[in-house]
Image (spheres, rainbow, N blue to C red):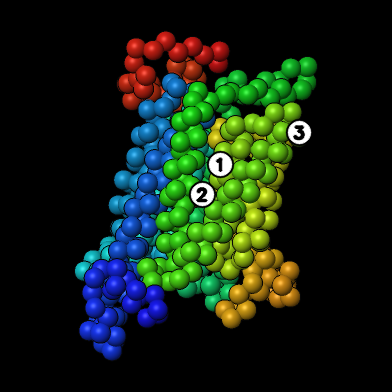
Amino acid sequence: MKKIILPIFLLLGIGTSAFAEDASQIELLMSSMDMIWLTLAAALVFFMQAGFAMVEIGLTRPKNAGNIIMKNLMDFAGGALVFWAVGWAIMYGSSYGGFGINTFLKSDDPTVLRDWIFQVVFAATAATIVSGAMAERTKFNAYLIYSVVISGIIYPFYGRLTWGGGFLSQMGFHDFAGSTIVHSVGGWAALMGAVILGPRIGKYIKKDGKVQVRAIPGHNLPLAALGVFILWFGWFGFNCGSTLSGTDASIAHIAVTTTLAASAGAIAAMFTMWISMGKPDVSMSLNGALAGLVGITAGTWVVGPGSAIIIGLIAGILVVLSVNFFDKVLHIDDPVGAISVHGVCGAFGTLAVGLFANKPDDGLVGVFYGGGFHLLGVQALGVIIAFGWVTITAGLLFTIIKKTIGLRVKEHEEIKGLDMEEHGTESYPGFQIFHNI
């Protein structure tokens, strides 16, 4: 570790002689670097909220842009409060001051506060994934309810089983930065929300006994692209920050595998669409990059660069097939492809650890490196438990909301747009915007 720390002294103009033999000073510096790194990484992940908002706005219609901004704003605002009140206690329990509903975060320990700020942005990410799949037809008050329940209960409970030291963690389940813990949890909640909510008006038309699938294009591809680049940028905080240490030399390795997987995912999605549809589709290529990022998130630390490229390539192809399957076969309306990007590719990325992991010193060796099927089996168990837990709890949550205050806006409100009907404002005042549906 001194090989990492001492050159920093030289960069800062500090002589090494005063510190070389003083272990306490080195420990203090390392602790300070961890504090700075995790706080900075949390800020990067927080900035991903803007990325999610831009992607969702760009891939949907302009009459709902303001509503999407409000949802992404309240995702974090409400999620932060409920994660402070109950989510943290559920997820980490006695490790940080007790387990139960009446355990608000009261610690003044800087390391606990540091860890909380890093974890709360992950909780908000899981919740905001749902927004895209349910865009353009969800009541805002209903969204506020299910958003805080996901951040405060559904996500932390599964997190307890894994990062919180629960039985999956004890079995050896490995999800470094949250392919399943964060992304699949959000993706499977999005699946249940989209199913129970139903499709947008005009999306699926029955004619002559057959269902015709109509594309509802987004209004601003450049904005969606900006969102993807913001997400890619924030992902370095997501993955590299999950080292939980600013002095961990594996940060560079993680940054490389993250970049390669995202790049491979974008290319694979582009060529898959080019071959199947005759054109290199813009929105699907963007989703391919996100698919690669989600796919590598679980194994970014334990796989090599070559394996990262393979994972990204598979994720990029998988997201295209999955989006088409949900849309054209199951007729589940997901305006931004959130179910496929986060749910499906998150599950795949978690399973990929059991195939491509190559960290024998840490007991993480996948099938392709002679490690047998034990790790793959544990990874599969974690994926199955996440799917079961989230689909049951989120399904009950959405059903209760639907039967009580209502989940979906009225037909005339959906047609006019949620900006005016839910918030009394326009996102593009002075512009004439026309819609066929």
Q: Secondary structure at mark 2?
A: helix
- Characterize the local packing of mark 2: few (<14), some (14-19) or many (20 or more) Cα atoms within 10 angstroms: many
Q: What residue sits right under mark 3 in the picture?
A: 276
Q: Are marks 1 and 2 in contact (CB under 8 Å)?
A: yes
**Front-lying residue, 218 or 84:** 218
Q: What residue sits right under mark 2 in the picture?
A: 186
Which amino acid lies under the numbered mark 1 shown in the image of this protein?
Ala
Q: Are marks 3 and 1 in contact (CB under 8 Å)?
A: no
Evaluate whether residue 217 shows in this view.
yes
Q: Secondary structure at mark 3?
A: helix
Structural distance between the alpha carbons of marks 2 and 3: 29 Å
Give the x, y percent position of residue 269.
66, 41
**Front-lying residue, 270 or 63:** 270
- Characterize the local packing of mark 1: few (<14), some (14-19) or many (20 or more) Cα atoms within 10 angstroms: many
Quadrant for the N terminus in the image: bottom left
Give the x, y percent position of residue 122.
42, 55
Give the x, y percent position of residue 343.
59, 49
Relative placement, left or right, of 41 versus 23 is right
Residue at position x 70%, y 38% from top? 271
Q: Is residue 322 above or below residue 135?
A: below
Residue at position x 34%, y 74% from top? 7
Evaluate whether residue 351 shows in this view.
no
Which amino acid lies under the numbered mark 3 shown in the image of this protein?
Ser
* Mark carried by residue 338: 1
